[in-house]
Image (tube, rainbow, N blue to C red):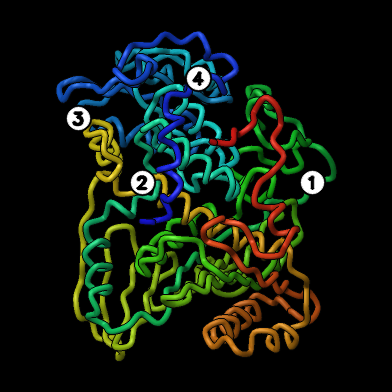
């Protein structure tokens, strides 16, 4: 079926199920009749001249862009804010009220969802909250804009897709590259065969990530943070890093490393260029957290190979500089954080969110594509039309690309540290991986990393069934497709 949306037709007999039963404190919400079923009052279709009332959940980092972005969309009013850090929340509420704008502040998203004067929810929390917050919002009748990656693991991302379809909600993924007209035109031009057959889709995340330091024991949680709510569905663990905020990216309990942080954008573009609409059938990785020992767990140097039928998708993470002591980063064909689509007769580079440039095999520029659209405005367009096909980054696309990050991380986590010669021997039949590994080794060498003394890990070679979204004959890998959720913050299985 089209774009892996094959389960949706099974839902027709279940659409009348109550949307609110899974929410522990929302069962008292009032409803209005809409013909075939009752929906929460905030699920009604709003007229073209009515404001869309939106709540922003999480705005210490990425959420600041949500605040600015939705302010610039005509017909949108930000009416509520939610953050588990009271200092962050109170500061932002004060800003709004200082401008004469009335907003209600919440620390608990469940309380926010009781507010019937909210039409849509925009989520920019840490990764481990994305799917649960979005599903709860969907079940309460709201449309959702959810940041990338849309999930912390593969299973919960699929439940988010199913919830959106079951409850007929509009759910946009925060991969704003999908709203770039320049990227759309460039990718369509390549897929039309103007550079011949695609040979490799390569994503790059060469982004400096210094050590986060090494603590000697549990650290104090900021007094302004409700740590129970901050932890939510993740395991309740002592804070074992110097900084609570942002550095959660580099701990498996809450983050997904730079694959899920920055790399999700480029992973998504590369899959988009290949035209693949399922998870990759084969995955392997090489890498590690190299050059320093700190409280981080995720790799700062990683190669991921997704062996798609169209062409391999190879992703590179580099958190170390171009050489030891430098403040610069490596580049690959002019890109540090971008995508390169290698074809028979040339290549397409995507060095930014709004630009794509085509070259021939000798590096001569052939064509440039530029342009963008507000990703937030595109979401509101879908909210008004009630057609998820109007979205540039529908939740299904977000799930698939997020899941590629997760399966790559699973391969790495199940890998074994090996000597360089053994790794080369294991991948000798994969030309693209051999070339990529050779460049990675040179990069590490100039950063004074001796792989003979501090070996990289050769990740598990995994096979994936794209229909069931489960690995073939690998219990350990399948165990990492989901997690044990901490009650009451449990991601529900959508029947």
Q: Which residue is mark 2?
A: 394
Rendering coords of residue 79 (x, y %): 35, 18
Q: Earlier in the sequence, mark 3 or mark 4?
A: 4
Is label 3 or label 4 in front? 4
Q: Are marks 3 and 4 in contact (CB under 8 Å)?
A: no
Residue 476 higher or lower than 450, as above or below = above
- Left or right of 37 in this view: 317: right
Q: Considering the numbered disc 4 on the image, is that residue within a helix, a strand or a loop?
A: loop
- Badge 2: few (under 14), some or many (20 or more) residues near its Cα, within 10 Å? many
Q: Tell me which residue sits at (46%, 62%) in the image.
A: 267
Is label 1 or label 4 in front? 4
Q: Are marks 1 and 4 in contact (CB under 8 Å)?
A: no
Q: Considering the numbered disc 2 on the image, is that residue within a helix, a strand or a loop?
A: loop
Q: Considering the numbered disc 1 on the image, is that residue within a helix, a strand or a loop?
A: loop
Q: Earlier in the sequence, mark 4 or mark 2?
A: 4
Rendering coords of residue 318 (x, y %): 57, 67
Which residue is nearer to you in this view: 69 or 3?
3
Is label 2 or label 3 in front? 2
Which residue is nearer to you in this view: 430 or 309?
309
How many numbered dots are placed on residues in this image?
4
Q: Which residue is mark 3?
A: 74
Rendering coords of residue 427 (x, y %): 64, 84
Q: Tell me which residue sits at (31%, 37%) in the image.
A: 69
Q: Tell me which residue sits at (35%, 14%) in the image.
A: 41
Q: Which residue is mark 1?
A: 215
Q: Distance between the Cα atoms at labels 2 and 3?
A: 21 Å
Q: Quadrant of residue 32?
A: top left
């Amino acid at each position: 079926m089209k774009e892996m949306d094959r389960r949706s037709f099974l839902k027709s007999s279940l659409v009348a199920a109550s949307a609110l039963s899974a929410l522990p404190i929302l069962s008292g919400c009032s409803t209005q009749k809409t013909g075939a079923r009752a929906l929460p009052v905030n699920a009604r279709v709003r007229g073209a001249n009515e404001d869309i009332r939106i709540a922003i959940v999480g705005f210490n980092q990425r959420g600041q862009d949500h605040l600015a972005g939705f302010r610039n969309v005509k017909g949108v009013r930000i009416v509520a804010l939610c953050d588990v850090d009271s200092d962050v929340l109170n500061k932002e509420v004060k800003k709004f009220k200082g401008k004469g704008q009335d907003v209600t502040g919440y620390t608990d998203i469940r309380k926010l969802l009781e507010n019937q004067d909210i039409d849509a929810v925009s989520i920019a929390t840490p990764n481990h909250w994305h799917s649960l917050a979005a599903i709860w919002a969907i079940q309460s009748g709201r449309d959702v804009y959810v940041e990338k990656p849309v999930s912390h693991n593969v299973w919960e991302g699929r439940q988010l897709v199913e919830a959106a379809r079951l409850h007929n909600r509009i759910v946009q993924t925060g991969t704003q590259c999908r709203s770039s007209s320049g990227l759309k035109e460039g990718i369509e031009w390549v897929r039309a065969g103007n550079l011949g057959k695609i040979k490799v889709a390569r994503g790059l995340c060469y982004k400096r990530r210094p050590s986060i330091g090494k603590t000697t024991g549990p650290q104090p949680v900021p007094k302004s943070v409700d740590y129970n709510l901050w932890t939510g569905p993740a395991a309740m663990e002592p804070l074992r890093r110097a900084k609570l905020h942002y550095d959660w990216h580099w701990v498996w309990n809450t983050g997904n490393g730079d694959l899920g942080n920055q790399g999700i954008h480029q992973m998504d573009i590369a899959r988009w260029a290949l035209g693949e609409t399922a998870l990759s059938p084969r995955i392997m990785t090489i890498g590690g957290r190299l050059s320093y020992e700190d409280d981080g767990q995720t790799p700062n140097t990683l190669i991921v190979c997704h062996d798609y039928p169209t062409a391999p998708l190879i992703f590179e993470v580099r958190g170390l500089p171009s050489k030891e002591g430098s403040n610069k980063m490596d580049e690959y064909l002019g890109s540090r954080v971008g995508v390169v689509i290698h074809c028979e007769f040339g290549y397409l580079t995507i060095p930014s969110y709004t630009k794509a440039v085509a070259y021939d095999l000798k590096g001569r520029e052939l064509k440039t594509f530029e342009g963008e659209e507000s990703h937030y405005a595109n979401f509101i367009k879908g909210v008004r039309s009630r057609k998820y096909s109007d979205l540039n980054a529908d939740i299904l696309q977000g799930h698939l690309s997020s899941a590629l990050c997760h399966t790559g991380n699973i391969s790495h986590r199940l890998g074994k540290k090996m000597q360089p010669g053994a790794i080369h021997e294991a991948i000798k039949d994969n030309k693209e991986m051999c070339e990529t590994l050779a460049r990675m080794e040179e990069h590490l060498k100039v950063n004074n990393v001796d792989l003979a003394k501090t070996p990289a890990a050769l990740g598990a070679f995994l096979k994936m069934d794209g229909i069931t979204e489960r690995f073939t004959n690998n219990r350990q890998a399948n165990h990492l497709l989901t997690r044990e959720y901490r009650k009451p913050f449990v991601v529900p299985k959508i029947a």
